[in-house]
Image (cartoon, rainbow, N blue to C red):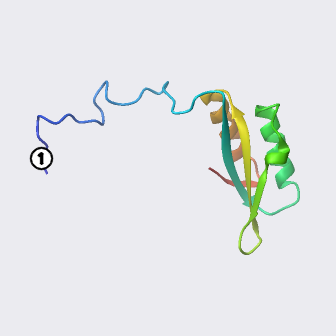
Amino acid sequence: MTTSPDLPKIIGVPGTEPSRQESLIDYPSQFPIKVMGQKVDGMVAAVTAIAHQFDPAFDASTIELRESKGGNYLGVTITVTATSREQLDELYRTLSTHPMVKVVL
């Protein structure tokens, strides 16, 4: 397949890719994060503690829980006040590396 020289390539052309500094999120913003792991004692408490670490005003009453069909896994949705991309990146890293957590979305 050939491309027309009149059509600009978007990927790899300077000035056509979004900057790493640009964000689609307006900060501060309420930002939901879904955390999934095995349904074990302490899972919700661990996720709550991490949320408080990155958002001291985190309201634990807003946590949403959803069990898997078989009841072996638990989805925990937290909504934090995102203040920067760096905060969200570190929050995702911290959640992802917790031993009780399997997936963070």
Task: Give whichever of 28, 40 is nearer the camera.
Answer: 28
Please indicate, yes or no, whether residue 84 appears anywhere in the rendered image. yes
Asked whether the viewer can see residue 97, the reply is: no
Three-letter code, disc 1: Thr
- At label 1, counting other C-alpha atoms closer than 10 Å, the crowd grade (few under 14, some 14-19, many 20 or more) is few
Is 20 left or right of 46, judged from the image as shown? left
Question: In the displayed structure, would residue 70 be above or below residue 94?
Answer: below
Q: Position of residue 7 (x, y in %)?
A: 16, 36
Task: Tell me what residue is drawn at x 51 percent, y 30 percent.
Answer: 23
Q: Position of residue 26 (x, y in %)?
A: 58, 29
- Residue at figure coordinates x 31%, y 29% from the top left: 16
The residue carrying mark 1 is: 2
Helix, strand or loop for disc 1: loop
20 vs 94, nearest the viewer: 20
Q: Position of 70 compared to 44: left or right?
A: left
Q: Position of residue 74 (x, y in %)?
A: 75, 62
Position of 23 relative to 65 (above/below)? above
